[in-house]
Amino acid sequence: MPGRRVARADAGRKDDAPWSVSTLTGHVKRALHAGLPARVRVVGEVSNLSDRNHWYFSLKDDDAAIRAVMFASAARKVGFPVASGMEVVATGRVDFYPAQGSVQLYVDRLEPVGQGARELALRALMEQLRAAGYFDPEQKRPLPAVPRKVAVVTSKSAAALQDVIDTAARRWKGCELVLVDVRVQGEAAAPQIAAALRELSQSGAGRGIEAVILTRGGGSIEDLWAFNERVVADALRDCTLPVVAAIGHETDTTIAELVADRRCATPTQAAMTLIPDGAVLAQQVDQLAGRLALALRRRSEVARARVEAAASHPLFRRPAVLVDDARRRLDALAARLDAAPRRRADDARRRLDGLARTLDAVGPANVLARGYSITRGPGGAVVRAAGDVRAGDVLTTVLAKGEVVSVVGEGGAPAPKRRMKTLKKPGTDEPTLFA
């Protein structure tokens, strides 16, 4: 390859021989590494910002500019909106990019410059947390009505702690306070506060702790800044115990207060919100005792009236009369019960006789008695039409009294007349006529 041939020529060149581009850029890279610290902090104005997942931009001042890049993993951690024209402090390393022959600042941290920039970063973080639901009222946990043990997360030297202790002692001596000593300002404050909240979330319930007060006194925005850190907001959101927060003065608003389950203006108000007033509780107990006594008295009066009404009932005044009346009703019912089967049998017999008379009126014997007859063929089947018989068939005609036996002639004509003789029907006195 051409590059390799040049490299070999460079290896054996004389002092006045030309350098290859790779050799020159290598010397530049080594010189930068030797002459600059591993990390630098540079203040400048953002210019030509290009957000292509990674951020590409320039940092400039009145006299110079340097190209910069911030990879996506670091850009996602920036807690404020970055735009061209903003003054920032960029922290990272300086390196030479041989492929483009340029020196670049590889940024891994950006900070806004000035008080206005800090407030801008705070607003940006608040918008992120609001979009993620950190401030939603539906996420707030209810406070215990009468807590027996409360953890106070603050500095042991803070005036806010004494305010909480005095208020708790005045309102409800049955509530025990547990101090969790943490830094409340400075760089170490936010990690300590978050760690304390996580510890209470994990083991507080097992120790009997029912709620948490997170508090400190007033101060500048820098003094209160630990309560605006994302790590504290995350710990508050994940805490399994309800948290009451009172940070700074009444006009101060921190992210911790917005994420907490209840926000109070002062440490004293936080203690009053969480710890009930013993005098008020005693008054409520007296009121409830009076209402209970009144309810019992009314129930007793109602019960007494019911007993008196029951005592005036005839059952208790004249029980023998009621028993005699009941016995008479029972005897009457027994008599009706005894007569019921006979009445039902008589009714059934009358209905049966009526049905028998109806059946006799339409029976075959009565029909024959009115002059009708029944003719049966050789098989005993009733003859209904002339076509049902053939010549030579013996027919039996049943009359009201006796039977007539005849033979069908040819062509359906009757057989020649013969002298009829009368015989008695076997087993009866009825005559049977034979042709």
Image (cartoon, grey):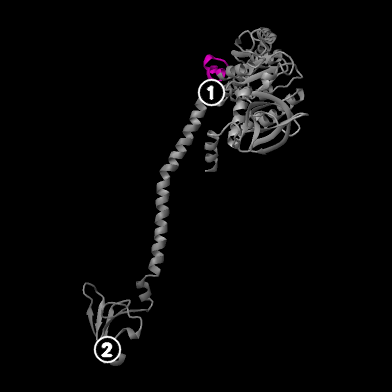
- Magenta segment boundaries in residue numbering: 199-209
Along the viewing direction, whichever of 410 and 301 lies nearer the viewer = 301
Q: Does the stretch in magenta take in 48?
A: no
**Residue carrying label 2:** 391
**Left or right: 13 with respect to 343?**
right
From the viewer's side, name the closer residue of 139 and 291.
139
- Residue 246 badge: none
Residue 163: image x %, image y %? Answer: 69, 9
- x 30%, y 90%: residue: 414
CA distance for labels 1 and 2: 99 Å
Neighbour class for label 1 at 10 Å: few (<14), some, many (≥20)? few
**Vertical arrangement, residue 346 with respect to residue 274, above or below:** below
Which one is in front, 182 or 348?
Answer: 182
Q: Earlier in the sequence, mark 1 or mark 2?
A: 1
Q: Quadrant of residue 86?
A: top right
- The residue sitting at 39% across, 51% down in the picture is 345
Mark 2 crowd level (few <14, some 14–19, many ≥20, 10 Å Cα):
some
Q: Position of residue 109 (x, y in %)?
A: 65, 27
Residue pointed to by mark 1: 316
Query: Mark 2 belongs to which amino acid?
Result: Ala
Amino acid bearing label 1: Phe
Left or right: residue 184 versus residue 361 is right
Q: Quadrant of residue 263?
A: top right
Magenta region, main secondary structure: helix
| Image location (x, y in percent) of residue 236 | 62, 23
Camera-side residue of 246 and 340? 246
Q: Residue 38, can we see it?
A: no
